[in-house]
Amino acid sequence: MGGSAIPVTVAGGAGTPALVWDAHAPTQKEAPVSTSVPECALNDGTTLPQIGFGTWPLKGADAERAVASALACGYRLIDSAVNYENEEAVGAAVRAAGVPRDEILVATKIPGRFHAHDLAVASVEESLRRMRLDRLDLVLIHWPNPSVGKYVEAWQGLVEARERGLVRSIGVSNFTERHLDDVIAATGVTPVVNQIEMHPAFPQAEMRQVHRRLGIVTQAWSPLGKGATLESPPVAAAARRHGVTGGQVVLRWEIQRGVVPVPKSADPGRQSENLDVFGFALSDAELAAIDALGRPDGRLFDGDPDTHEEM
């Protein structure tokens, strides 16, 4: 990849005009919204915060406390999944947060064992019951599980769930270009996001190009790559130059590459730190240096969507 940055269009809150910023500029002009987190436009006409809060592997009271803290810090996108076994805790934290429900986007994912049309709809309904919410804001297919061969049927079920008003937006996770082409060809509906593994060691340049072509927003799970590159020379140098941490540099790199990262931390201080990435901008040279950390075997585990499957 080259060193060019991607302009990102973000939308302000109620009564706030849309803002277009260019990562070539020395600083970003931040929209005056209550959480100070810009939003990116989705292909269904809705928007998504430019950074979210991940909840894996938090469960029970730990998950509830962490989500409550994240919401207090200003996160407005909370990422969960059926297989995380924390939907009840996420829902409880959202209900108790004192934040207007319309300001919070709750996301979950349907597991492989629900890969059929009716089962996918049932999975959404069960998630709503567990979370005790009146709607979900984003539901993804967690993994394509290609050997089972029913991810298209699962996608058709999510389209129906959206049409019934059970969920606002629908997307996928860990899909390859072929998987995306299959669900779009079958339904005419393009996922709003594809949540994939992405971090400096595995920057996913080809998939991000596919997403740009199709109008899909890239979300990054494990965006800090378990810290493997936070002390690398390009990240450390940028952190010193901007007076921030290595983690903030990596999250900013992803945001300037047009990606929505979903970092996880149970520590309120680290949550705030991860969210505080809109007051500085990386240069083209800094972006390119971090890009260069990528390597073909950079995955955190053997999570190739053509072979890895989860039920």
Image (cartoon, rainbow, N blue to C red):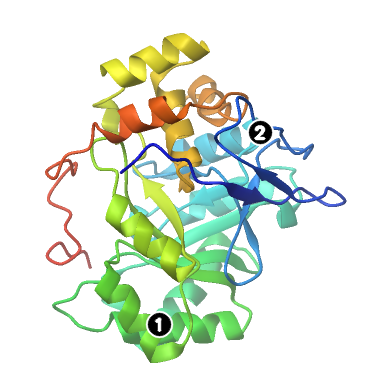
Residue drawn at 57 percent across, 80 percent down: 162
Instruction: Check disc 2 and give the amino acid type.
Output: Ala
Residue 284: percent from left, percent from top? 44, 30
**The quadrant where residue 47 appears:** bottom right
Residue 74: percent from left, percent from top? 65, 35
**Count of all numbered marks drawn on residues in the image:** 2
Residue drawn at 75 percent across, 39 percent down: 31
Tell me the distance, in whole angstroms, between the alpha carbons under discs 1 and 2.
37 Å
Residue drawn at 41 percent across, 17 percent down: 238
Residue drawn at 34 percent across, 87 percent down: 153
Secondary element at image label 1: helix
Residue 160: percent from left, percent from top? 52, 87
Whether residue 27 is visible, yes or no, is yes
Secondary element at image label 2: helix
Circle 1 residue: 184
Query: Where the N terminus falls, by quadrant?
Result: top left
Q: Nearer the viewer, residue 16 or 263?
A: 16
Q: Is residue 1 above or below residue 138?
A: above
| Left or right of 280 on screen, residue 17 | right
Q: Nearer the viewer, residue 122 or 255?
A: 255
Circle 2 residue: 72
Q: Is residue 128 above or below residue 102?
A: below
Whether residue 119 is visible, yes or no, is no
Residue 235: percent from left, percent from top? 35, 20
Instruction: Check disc 1 and give the amino acid type.
Output: Ile
For discs 1 and 2, the disc positioned in front in the rendered view: 1
Which mark is drawn over residue 92?
Answer: none
Q: Is residue 59 above or below residue 178?
A: above
Q: Classify 10 Å Cα crowding around label 1: few (below 14), some (14-19), many (20 and above).
A: some
